[in-house]
Image (cartoon, grey):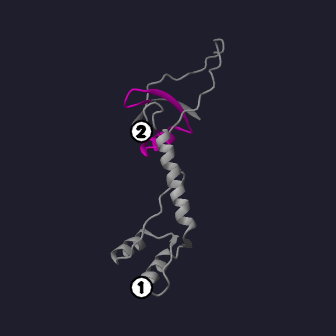
Amino acid sequence: MIRFSLVCDQGHAFESWFRDSSSFDDQAERGLLSCPQCASVKIGKAIMAPQVARKDREPAPSAPAPQPVALMSPEEQALRAKVRELRAMLTEKSDYVGERFANEARAMHDGEIEHRAIHGEASGEDVRSLIEDGIEIMPLPMLPDERN
C-alpha cells in the first residue's frame, strides 16, 4: 500500500491510500476519486517528500493512523444507490436469457415468440445489428462496482 498526498483543482489537500501508483492513475482517469471538501474529480498528486528510514537516528514516533477519506460526495453516493435500485428493479422484472439475448429479441420483434421483458448479454456486433433492424433495446445501467 502507498499513501499519496492529493490535491484537487480547487487547491484542497487530502491523503488517500492505494495499492500502487497505477491504481491511483486508473482511478483518477475513470473519475472515481473526488475531493472530500468540494467533490471535484480533478485530482492530482501533490508534491511529497519520501520518508526514508535511517539506522543512525532514533526511530521516529509512529504516525497517527490514517483517517478514512470519503472518495464520493453524499450526492454521488445517493446517485449510485439509485442506479443500483433501478438495475435491481429492471432485472427482477425481466427474464435472464444470457447469451441468447440477441436471438430472443429478434424472435420477439419478428413475432416468432411472445413479447416479454428480457435481459442478457450481446456482442457489440449483435447490438448494432439489432438497432439497425429497428429493434428497440436498452443497456442496463452499469454499476460502479462492476468497473473495479
Residue shown at 45%/70% (left/top)? Answer: 123
* Residue 126 position within the rendered picture, expressed as x and y whole percent measured from the top left: 42, 73
User: Regarding mark 1 in the picture, which secondary structure is present there?
Assistant: loop
Question: For the residue carrying disc 2, how many other residues have a C-alpha within 10 Å: few (<14), some (14-19), or many (20+)?
Answer: some
- Identify the magenta region: 7-33
- CB atoms at circles 2 and 1 under 8 Å apart? no
Let me know if residue 82 is in the magenta part: no
**Of residues 4 and 52, which is closer to you in this image?**
4
Mark 2 belongs to which amino acid?
Val
Q: Is residue 147 visible?
A: no
Q: Position of residue 37 (x, y in %)?
A: 46, 30
Specify the quadrant that holds the N terminus. top right
Q: Which mark is residue 110?
A: 1
Q: How many marks?
A: 2
Residue 26 highlighted magenta (yes or no):
yes
Q: Earlier in the sequence, mark 2 or mark 1?
A: 2
Q: Which mark is residue 41?
A: 2
State the residue lying farthest toward the bottom: 112
Amino acid type, callout 1: Asp
Please tell me which residue is depicted at 50% across the width and 69% down the height of the picture: 121
Number of other residues with Cα within 10 Å of mark 1, as a class: few under 14, some 14 to 19, many 20 or more: few
Residue 45 visible at all: yes
Depth-wise, is mark 2 or mark 1 nearer the camera? 1
The image position of residue 141, as x and y in percent, is: 47, 59
Quarter of the image for residue 29 reads: top left
Which residue is painted at 42% across and 81% down in the image? 109
